[in-house]
Image (cartoon, rainbow, N blue to C red):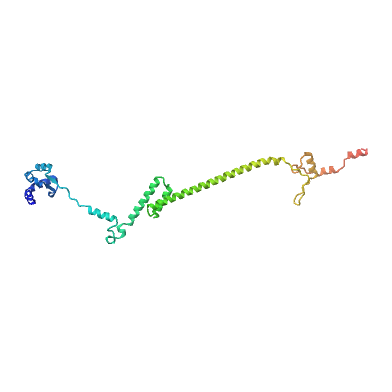
Amino acid sequence: SCANIKSTMVGLKIQKRLAASILKCGKSKVWLDPNEANEISMANSRQNIRKLIKDGLVIKKPPMMHTRFRARALAAAKRKGRHMGTGKRRGTRDARMPSKKLWVKRQRVLRRLLKKYRDAKKIDKHLYRELYLKAKGNVFKNKKNLMEYIFKAKSEKLKEKQLNDQAEARRQKNRSLRDRRAAKAAIIIDEQQPKQQDVVVPTDKPSKKTKGDKDTAKTPAVQAASDATGKGSPKDIKTKPISKTQETKSAAPDKTAVTNKSGKK
């Protein structure tokens, strides 16, 4: 019985003290085998206690631990929303979860996503900078909103690029068409130009003078010069002015011609 065990274990104080010293623990942590009380009581030295420890008659008890079962069950219930009503809350809303912590957490999530997309070449550096500043300006509420905005921006950019390419192709086509038309027109003009030079239209009737036209009648001196040189345009002929002595000579009759007619000298 327990009383008999206690009576037999009364004389083992020295053994328990020596065992606690050897095991480096308190006396309450030392377990002595009650069935081998007689043999343990015979051990009165440290060497004998070490032999008993080696044989398993003296054991160091394991440390006592506070159970976490109830704490884990309560934490699991709180994760589901239990025990979190108004009666269980202590402190203001910002004290329980500071808004600054929420802001820092959201910014880190958004910036991490932007950096990941930039490294993966999904967005260029210009779009990265634009979205970075928008995230800083509290435009995106969460990660999903940012991903939707990126998808929409990329689709719009692709559509704009396609429209620009189509417009450029249209301009190139019109430019080539204009060049072909100009080349064709130049060929037609070159073919028609020699024919127009060969054909000469005769003009029998002189053109009528109008009031605005100047009188282009040639003077006798100019007519004579033109007949001598064979050039018809008076502009190309430079006529010299007639002096007074030449005029008197031309006006005086020839004496030799008069004497010949009369037969006298």
Q: Residue furthest front?
A: 1
Residue 155 horizontal/vertical position (percent)? 45, 49
With 115 as the anchor, is 264 left or right in this view?
right
Residue 150 horizontal/vertical position (percent)? 42, 50
Residue plotted at (79% across, 43% down): 223
Residue plotted at (62% across, 42% down): 184
Residue 29 horizontal/vertical position (percent)? 14, 48
Residue plotted at (52% across, 47% down): 166
Q: Is residue 88 above or below residue 222?
A: below
With 224 as the anchor, is 129 left or right in this view?
left
Between 123 and 222, which is closer to the camera in this rendering?
123
> How many circles with numbers are drawn on the protein?
0
Q: Quadrant of residue 87?
A: bottom left
Between 21 and 66, which is closer to the camera in this rendering?
66
Q: Quadrant of residue 180?
A: top right
Residue 151 horizontal/vertical position (percent)? 42, 50
Q: Residue furthest bottom?
A: 87
Between 70 and 20, which is closer to the camera in this rendering?
70
With 8 as the anchor, is 234 left or right in this view?
right
Between 61 and 15, which is closer to the camera in this rendering?
61
- Quadrant showing the C terminus: top right
Residue plotted at (65% across, 42% down): 188
